[in-house]
Image (spheres, rainbow, N blue to C red):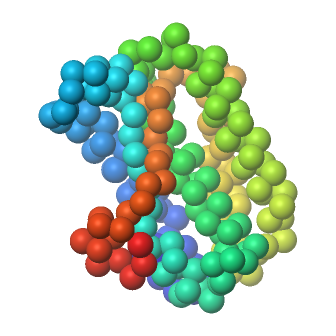
Amino acid sequence: LKFFPNKDSFDYEAFINVVQTMIIAQDILIDNSGYPTELIKENSMNYRPLGAGYTNLGAVLMYLGLSYDSDEGRDLAALLTAFETGVAYLTSNELANRLGSFKHFERNESSFYNVLNKHASSVSKLLDKTQDKFNNRFPSIKNFVKDVWNKITAKIQNQELFRNGTVTLLAPTGTISSLMQAATT
């Protein structure tokens, strides 16, 4: 909700900065965390999975006057999710360029790229589906999403490395949302 300074704009730059910061912070925490079992520790070190997500989506939809169960509400949620996921993977790529990929990247390279290509294909369909939506309220959102996923597609074609096996996770956020004083969970 904080990224919508008013009902007709979205703060793209702040959103990008927050996603980048969260990915970097979560990656640092992997090496500095305690783990309940040796297997969980080993998995975390080998694949460096992250769990960026969001909260307050319901409040955003209410603030913007969009029904939870409307095509426009679902499409906006999908665009925001695609944007966050894309920025997170680009940040993971930047980290890999500085620090190296996750340990088993080479072993999983083909399937990893396959998953990212499926994401990119779904994003392309979403952009086609929403071609005329949001042009008045958020005219740049589709351009930002398209740009991010075009960059990821180019990195796949260049067989570039990624630091993290996964970067996002849309988990239930009830407790965390309450602690953050979010309007919705």
The spot of residue 146 in percent (x, y) is 70, 51
User: Does residue 160 appear to the left or right of 146 in the view shown?
Assistant: left
The image quadrant that residue 49 belongs to is: top left
The image quadrant that residue 69 belongs to is: bottom right
Quadrant showing the N terminus: bottom left
Residue at image point 76% right, 41% down: 121
User: Does residue 63 appear to the left or right of 26 in the view shown?
Assistant: right
Q: Can residue 150 be seen in the rendering of this structure?
A: no
The spot of residue 95 in percent (x, y) is 39, 31
Q: Looking at the picture, tell me which residue is in the foreground, 68 or 36.
A: 36
Residue at image point 62% right, 47% down: 148
Residue at image point 65% right, 60% down: 78
Quadrant showing the C terminus: bottom left
The image quadrant that residue 115 belongs to is: top right
The spot of residue 96 in percent (x, y) is 41, 25
Q: Looking at the picture, tell me which residue is in the foreground, 77 or 4.
A: 77
Residue at image point 38% right, 15% down: 103
